Structure formats: C-alpha cells, structure tokens
Amino acid sequence: MVGYDEMWVEDGGNVNPHWRRLMKDLTKLGDNELERRRTDARRLLRENGVTYHIYSDPKGQKRTWQLDPIPLVINSQDWGAISVGLKQRARLLDMILRDIYGPRRLIKEGLIPAELIFAQQGFLRACDQVQMKDLPHLVLYAADLARGPDGRMWVLGDRSQAPSGAGYALETRMAMTRVMAEEFRRTQVHRLSIFFRHLRSMLASMLPHRKDDPRVVILTPGPHNETYFEHAYLASYLGYSLVQGDDLTVRGGKVWMKSLDGLKQVDIIVRRVDDTFCDPLELREDSHLGVPGLLQAARLGNVIIANPLGSSILESPALMPFLPNIAKHWLGEDILLPSAATWWCGQQKERDYVLANIKDLVIKPIDRRGPSVFGSQLSEKQLLELKNRINAAPYMYVGQQVLSCSTAPSLRNGKIVPRRVLLRTYLTAHQGDYDVMPGGLTRVAQDEDALFVTNQTGGLSKDTWILADKPVHQASLWPSIRQMESLMAGEGVLPSRSGENLFWVGRYTERSEGLLRLIRTVLSKLADYDDYRDESDQVVLNHLLETLTHFTWVYPGFTGEDAQEKLQRPRLHIMDMVLNREHRSSLIGTLNSLLQSAYNVRDLWSVDTWRVVDDIDENLQYLSSNKTRFSILQTELDSLLASLMAFNSQTQESMPHEHGWYLLNVGRRLERALQLICFIRTCFVQYAGEVPEHLMLEATLVNHESLITHRRRYRSVQHIFTVLDLMLLDTRHPRSLAYQVDKIMSLIGALPQQSPSHHLSREQRLILQASTEIKLAEVEKLSNISDELGTRRALAKLLDSVERRLEKVSELLHQRYFTHTQSARQLAPTKLELPA
C-alpha cells in the first residue's frame, strides 16, 4: 500500500520505537495464538451483548461488535501535539456555535458567507438566540482523524450533535484488557475512565444549585437505533436514566420524566437523538422520537441539552475551508490540526476547481441530504449528472481531497497485514477548557483497497493505546464523600417505560418456562402412548395437548373441529406450536418477545445477567434453525429451560429489590397463576375417569415440579384432594395458586401508591378478594363432581373468579403505571400525511 504506515519509520526499514515492545510480544504469540485471542474477544463481546446495527445486515441488532485484537499505538509526544490541536478546534467550534445562534458576527464580519449557514438543514431557525449563559455549548465533541502521507494528522470530519462511539471505545478497552492482559500491562497505556469522570463532573457543574445530585438522563431513539447498545452501556456506566422521547413530557416550561412514582423534573438531557427529531412541536413534526415543547423548555433555561439543538451545523464540511481564517481572526492563532483540503462550491473560483478536478475528489453535500460520492468511481454519464446538480445549486456541495489514510497492522485470516485506519477521538468540556479522551475508537478498512472506513460498511474496530511515560494509576468514577452523603437518600428513579418492560420480562420469562415444561410433559406422555398404546394415556395426552393450545393461543390447534385428526398425528402440530415464527405466542415467539423486552432495558442488567440472556438467545437461534428435529427437541428444551432458570436466579439475586424488581416479579407471579388456572381447568374441571385422572394428577405434579413435595407431604396417597390442596390452597408451596396470589399482594403493596397508606387501591382490593376466595375454599367441595356430566362446578367457579380478578389486576397496573408511556400523536395531519 502507498502512504504512511503507523508501525514503520518513514524509510520503511525499521519498526517505530513505540511499536517495538508490542510487535515483539505479538511475534512471540504467533498467528494461531493471535487468532485464538480474537475468537476469545469476539466471544466476550457477544456474551456482553456488544452489538452494532448495520441496516443492510440481515443479522440486524444481533450483529456482534467486530474487534481487531491488534491495537493502534501512538506515543505520548505525538498524542500531546494531537491533543493540543483538538482542544483548540473544540474551543473554536464552541465559539462558532454560540455565534451562529447568537449575534452572527461571522456573517457580519464577512468570515462566512450567509448562504453557507442559512441554506443547510443543520441550521435550525427555531433555535435562534437559544443560549446557555456562561456555559459551554459544545459539551461533547468528536473528530475523525487520519494521518496523511506526510505523517501529519488531518481532520476528516467533526461530530458535534450526538457523537457516537465513546461507549464502544470503553467496552473495546475492557475486552482488550482481558484478552491481551499481559501485553497491556507491559505497554503502560493511558486509561479511559478519567475521561468519563470528567464528563460526569462537567454535567454536574452545569447546575450549581444541584451540583451534587442533578437529574441527568440519556435520550435514546430506542432499541432499533444502530448504537443502542452504547446508549444503554453509558447510561449504566455513568449511572444515568436511559429514556426515550415518550418517557419525557414538558409541563409549565419544564421537562419531567414519567416515573413509577410520578413526574420527576429533569435537569440535563444528554441526547443521542438527531436534533431535528427532538421536538415535533417546533422542529420535525412527523417525529415520534422527541419531546413536544422541549425547545421551549431549553429556551426558558429550564433544561440543559448536551449538545444543544442545532449543533449539527458544525458537522457541515462547508465550514472546514473557513476555519483557519476564523481561528486567526478570533483566536489570533494558526489552526493546529488542519482539515482535509475542502472547496465550497458556493464560491466561483472554488466551484470551477471542483468541476475541473471532480474525478480526483470526493463530493459531499453540505448537510445530510445525500451520501458522499467519489468521482473516481463514477461513469462519464454519472459525472455529467453530478456536475449538473452542482451547477444547479452550487452552495449545496463541497469537493474534498481524497486523503490516503495511514495503515496499521491488522489481523486478517490469521495473518498480520496492513490496513487503512481512521481514528475517532472524543472531548468533553471540563473546567473552562476541554479534556481529550486518552485513546479513542479506531476503525479499520475491511479490504485493502477500501476508500471508506466505517462500521456501516462492515469495517472492524480496534483499541487505541496512547503510551504513557510512566506507570498509569487507575481512576474511579466514584464521587467524593461529600457527594456520596447527598446520594444516600434512596433508590434511583425508574422510568415508566422501563417498569413496563420489566413487568413483561417477568411475564414472558414465566410464560416461556411454563410452555417449556408443558411441552416436555407432552413429549413424555406421547412417548408413553407410543410404547403402550393405552387408552388412558391417550386421554391424558389429549388433555395436555388441549392445554398446550390454550397456552400458545395457536388456535384451533387441538381444540377445533379437526382436533381428532390432529390428535392421531400430533408431532407436526406440536412442532408448529414450538417453532412457528408467525405465531407470537408460540414458544419461539414468546422467547423473542422476552429477548426484545430484556433488550429494551439493557441498561438495567448486570454483565452476568446479560450473559445468561445471550445464552437464551443462542439456544433460541439453534432452536429456530432447521437443525431441530422432533427426536432431539426435548434435549434442546432442557438446555433452554436451564438458561431460563439461570436468568430467574440472576434477577432474584443480582437486581436490587426496588420498584423494577417488584414489577418484574409481579409479572412472573401473575403469569404463573394464570397458567396454573388454565392447566387445572383444562385437566380437572371435567372428570375424565378414574385411571386417566390418576395419570393426569401425576403429570400435573411433574409438570409443576411438585412431585417430590407431594410425596413428602402426603406420603403414598395421590388423590384429587391432595393435588388440589397442594396446587391451589397451600400458601407455603412456591408453585401453588395461593402462594402466587399472596406474593402478588405483597409486591403490589411495595409499589408507589397514590391513595393514603391506610386505604387499599383497586388492585389491592381485587387481589385481597382473590386471596380470600382461595383461603375460604374447601378442597372437598372443589373436588366434588356436581352433575351427571362430570363437571366440578365449584372448582370451575373458583378458577374463573380468580382468573377474572388477576386479569383485572394486570389491567389496573397498566393503567396506573404504564398507560402514560403510550406515544403522543399529532392531532393535525403532518406534511407526510397530506394529499399531494
């Protein structure tokens, strides 16, 4: 490859001194060991749920972050010069941002043409004169750097509205310190945690009256965004609430978060939503990602947004050719980090140059209206069309030099080869200046001749090691003792959306477990019937298959007019209830719903809990593949059940027993109770005969993990009396209906209540009534057959009554805690909805 190589000195004969130790270590490891470590890193990232959504990738959200185990190494002297240049650039861009939405001296003094600002989408007129007095506007900033053939670092792009990648850089470092632990220790690399500590400190200092405990939230577009993992990861790492637009509301000119215990005022929003989508009231009216009225709250100074709405204008490449003159005029300094040579076509001389040299340039729009185009890759017809577009609206385009990025060692197919690299560095405002992350996210070109270096085109990433002159000590995110005292008041605030997702995680987990256990019981009874062809086994199997139909809602299933025909050959229909992706209540559909709900609250899970979620996902992917055959279905179900039980254990032992945990367990107990009611009703309300009922009693105990308990409790007696007593009325048995209802009552009592403490809420009254009904029930009456049709009416009445109350409790919980999470909608048609 032609150009500068990071590892070699310029004459190409020797390895750069700061690379020598690492390359010596890598040579000792050998290609096979390096490949093994890359595999270990990939496994670690997958287990930790580190994903990046490539829109053209069929894996979608499931694509694991791709890591090259060979880092980019930069010595301390080189990095010192780069840092000084980055700080200068950040200060300059902050001044420009203030001016564009303030006095606009840049235009008045002729430093920037007016049409360069006013013609692009990045300039938001609604944000005019929205200023943060005595505070930096550009709180977070990132720059894409590439080293040119001359060995100098050049800025290829500025990222100012919602710079992404800092979380991936941190997680990449975590993985590298695991798989390259000895090499990392010997190389003396600067640590990244101090950057995030400064970020937290900066955000807290923006509110002097609440410096110790400001309410900071991270605003995300949601789980379908390509960098959602990073949003959740940073929220968890920094200790902030992760919210979507619907979790916030503006009232009285202030921003409030909808939480389980009411509205909580938000002080600072770290946004990961593009600015035009942030306020459908004043900006993009068809947006469902923002908060109506957010801009007015910022205008009144009642909320701080980092970075401010409208800051995307700094990302325009059209600003680049004007920065040196602005720096000279305002700072009295030459710009230290030059931009890639750029020509704005709004000026005649520059436009003529671009049109004459279009094959050697990359043509970019001044905002995000279209993709960048390499002139060298276009046909003559395409070049002519591009020239016509430039001539029609010259102020909308720039031509930029195609910079030949430097190369660095990269592991490809077990071999170390050179690949082009692009470094994204991050800065945060801190104590009147800017602090540079001592590292960053290095992206690696996938192919040898690739012009683009980006994750969306399938590139890899690597860690960036900034060498220190002396051993580096670990930095902590923990605040000082003075701050800690103010934080000891109680639990963190849980957004209502997170509470709703946790509630459904509980329900889907229990629903999946119940389905798995029932399918295993069905398979066992099917094997018995195949072996002995006993009519009683057939009756039991029919009842269990009918129960499976009710569990999965895959109707008509084994309950319709053709039920008898299906019962003769049940295997195909059982597989359909397990594997059918079209049915949301099939086993696969339920597990997918569980994973989606868990992913929506990614920021609330511990690392070990998420690894269990990854195990569930991996088992599900195998189950969903065509490899699953009926003969090995039970083995696959056993593996899935073990993962679900591990997840339940993790949530019970690792989650703090706060509002989120209460809701998760309310969901679990509700689902377990409703499934048990369905099972008992289908199998025992209608008397099936002495022998079939005896077999069904045993199947019930096995299915609900109660056989050993029953034997110990009632010794050798197995009767409808004893089974109903254990499964419905026993308040000490964790699988009984009475136990679930009592647990629900206790958990609901721990949730925030709007009524006075001595008054019961509607849901508390309903659950108390259900508990009382169960406690007053007499097992002899429940077991009694009431008519000549063999119906146990007392049992049916109890089950129906408790079921109605539990379903109403679920509905009331949604009304009390979750209904305000529904999306706001425009009352008038938007531009997209109006007829042409």
Image (spheres, rainbow, N blue to C red):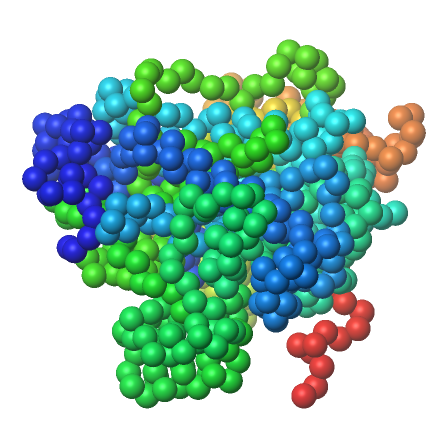
Furthest residue toward top: 481
Residue 24 placed where, x, y %? 12, 28
Q: Please tell me which residue is depicted at 48% across the width and 52% down the height of the picture.
A: 324
Count of numbered badges drawn on the protein? 0
Residue 670 visible in rendering? no
Residue 96 visible in rendering? yes
Q: Is residue 676 left or right of residue 262?
A: left
Q: Is residue 593 left or right of residue 417?
A: right
Residue 214 placed where, x, y %? 71, 30
- State the residue in front, 749 or 769: 749
Vertical order, 647 against 306 (above or below): above
- State the residue in front, 352 or 295: 352
* Rendered image quadrant of residue 28: top left
- State the residue in front, 187 or 809: 187
Q: Please tell me which residue is depicted at 78% across the width and 38% down the height of the picture.
A: 265
Furthest residue toward left: 13
Q: Is residue 656 left or right of residue 352?
A: right
Q: Please tell me which residue is depicted at 72% across the width and 17% down the height of the picture.
A: 486
Residue 410 placed where, x, y %? 20, 44
* Rendered image quadrant of residue 187: top left
On-image quarter of the N terminus: bottom left
Q: Please tell me which residue is depicted at 73% across the width and 43% down the height of the picture.
A: 132
On-image quarter of the C terminus: bottom right
